[in-house]
Image (tube, helix red, strand yellow):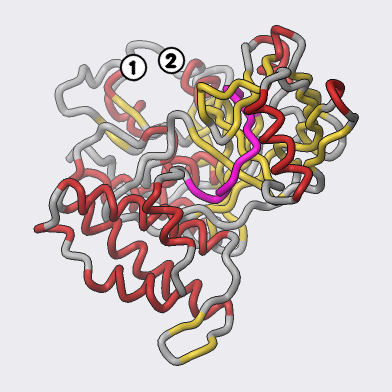
């Protein structure tokens, strides 16, 4: 079978680099040698080459000897099985076997392995994150007004995304600030460019708190109108768009933890609805719904027979539910006022059900 049979070995929590350990493997060894380092084998590949194997998770010495299993690599491998870094291309029928292999190493290290999703949700690609900021303000008067604040904060656990918590580590933006062309937009809209780092109208720097920015907006009426919205307090949060270059996965209190160490930044935006990946009319409409009404709407959904328009509405609805899970105030449950933990748990459960149904009918 392509998933390599699970086995017990010594484990280690030392720092891990998959490419470095794979590079130390000896060339043109036999099949059993490579099976000691990986969790999956391509049945169509040449078993005498490491190219036929994937999900490396064992430390490899400078002499090519294969040693202890890395608990960090095992957690990262399970995260990939669940959709992180774009997921995996191995056959669906092999995911359980790979998970069992990696999970056994974690259990040997007295670590409870993360669960295997029945339908992974890809995380790789361009992502958006939003934060309730320490500050977002307009400084100056007249033609000298500028927008200042933080687009991201370091070392602060995020509200939970699908099944993981995220922390941005200091230095995550160092490379991108030196190399990349970054814009400041309004509400992620390409047609409203507030500033650009290469033009000197967007200044970005890392400090002890996080990613600090200063935007010198254009002398245009639309930009002045946006500044008024910030000054009034109607808009008080920022969002940024990025792609992970180096993220590391561990577990903490039985939950996946993603540490972002290097990210390519595309743009930062003052945003009206920061918790949501979309800002469509449907999402804005859902914002006015009580939690009870959202629950009822979800309960009535028939994913399998819905039209394309219904499915788009569903995606918008799920985006809004995600936002309510992150930042929304406690709403009413079916039996009146509910504690935050109760309605969050209820919505999160239905959210998982709907996403599974979407995957089954896609």
Crowding around mark 2 (Cα neighbors within 10 Å: few <14, some 14 to 19, many 20+) is some
Q: Nearer the viewer, residue 92 or 12?
A: 92
Residue 200: quadrant of the picture: top right
Residue 91: image location, x then y, percent: 19, 38
Q: Is residue 29 magenta?
A: no
Look at the numbered disc 2 and give the secondary structure of its residue. loop
Q: Nearer the viewer, residue 138 or 95?
A: 138
Q: Residue at x 54, y 17 (%)?
A: 63
Q: Nearer the viewer, residue 46 or 225?
A: 225
Give the residue pinned by disc 1: 29
Give the residue pinned by disc 2: 26
Which portion, as a residue range, is magenta? 262-276
**Res. 278 in view:** yes
| Label tally | 2
- Indicate left or right for 301 with 315 as reference: left
Look at the numbered disc 1 and give the secondary structure of its residue. loop
Q: Residue at x 49, y 77 (%)?
A: 343
Residue 58: image location, x then y, percent: 48, 35
Real-space Cα distance between discs 1 and 2? 6 Å
Residue 151: image location, x then y, percent: 71, 36
Q: Is residue 273 magenta?
A: yes
In which quadrant of the rendered image does the N terminus lie? top left
């Amino acid at each position: 079978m392509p998933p390599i049979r699970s086995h017990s070995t010594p484990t280690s929590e030392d720092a891990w680099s998959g490419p470095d350990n794979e590079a130390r493997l000896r060339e043109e060894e036999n099949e059993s040698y490579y099976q000691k380092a990986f969790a999956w084998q391509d049945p169509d590949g040449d078993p005498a080459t490491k190219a036929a194997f994937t999900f490396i998770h064992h430390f490899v010495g400078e002499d090519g000897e294969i040693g202890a299993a890395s608990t960090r690599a095992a957690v990262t491998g399970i995260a990939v099985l669940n959709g992180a870094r774009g997921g995996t291309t191995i056959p669906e029928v092999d995911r359980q076997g790979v998970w069992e292999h990696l999970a056994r190493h974690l259990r040997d290290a007295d670590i409870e392995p993360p669960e295997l999703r029945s339908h992974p949700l890809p995380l790789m690609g361009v992502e958006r994150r939003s934060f309730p900021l320490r500050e977002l303000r307009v400084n100056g008067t007249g033609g000298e007004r500028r927008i200042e604040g933080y687009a991201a904060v370091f070392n602060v656990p995020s509200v939970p995304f699908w099944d993981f918590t995220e922390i941005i580590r200091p230095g995550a933006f160092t490379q991108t600030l030196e190399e990349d062309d970054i814009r400041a937009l309004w509400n992620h809209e390409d047609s409203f460019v507030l500033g650009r780092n290469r033009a000197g109208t967007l200044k970005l720097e890392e400090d002890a708190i996080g990613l600090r920015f200063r935007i010198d907006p254009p002398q245009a009426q639309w930009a002045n109108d946006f500044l008024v919205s910030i000054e009034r307090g109607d808009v008080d949060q920022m969002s940024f768009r990025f792609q992970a270059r180096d993220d590391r996965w561990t577990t903490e209190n039985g939950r996946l933890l993603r540490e972002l160490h290097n990210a390519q930044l595309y743009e930062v935006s003052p945003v009206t609805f920061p918790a949501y990946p979309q800002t469509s009319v449907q999402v804005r409409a859902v914002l006015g719904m009580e939690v009870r009404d959202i629950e009822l709407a979800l309960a009535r959904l028939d994913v399998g027979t819905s039209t394309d328009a219904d499915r788009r509405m569903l995606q918008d609805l799920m985006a809004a539910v995600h936002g309510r899970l992150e930042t929304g105030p406690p709403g009413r449950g079916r039996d009146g006022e509910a504690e935050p933990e109760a309605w969050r748990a209820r919505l999160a459960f239905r959210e998982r059900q709907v996403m599974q149904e979407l995957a089954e009918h896609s």
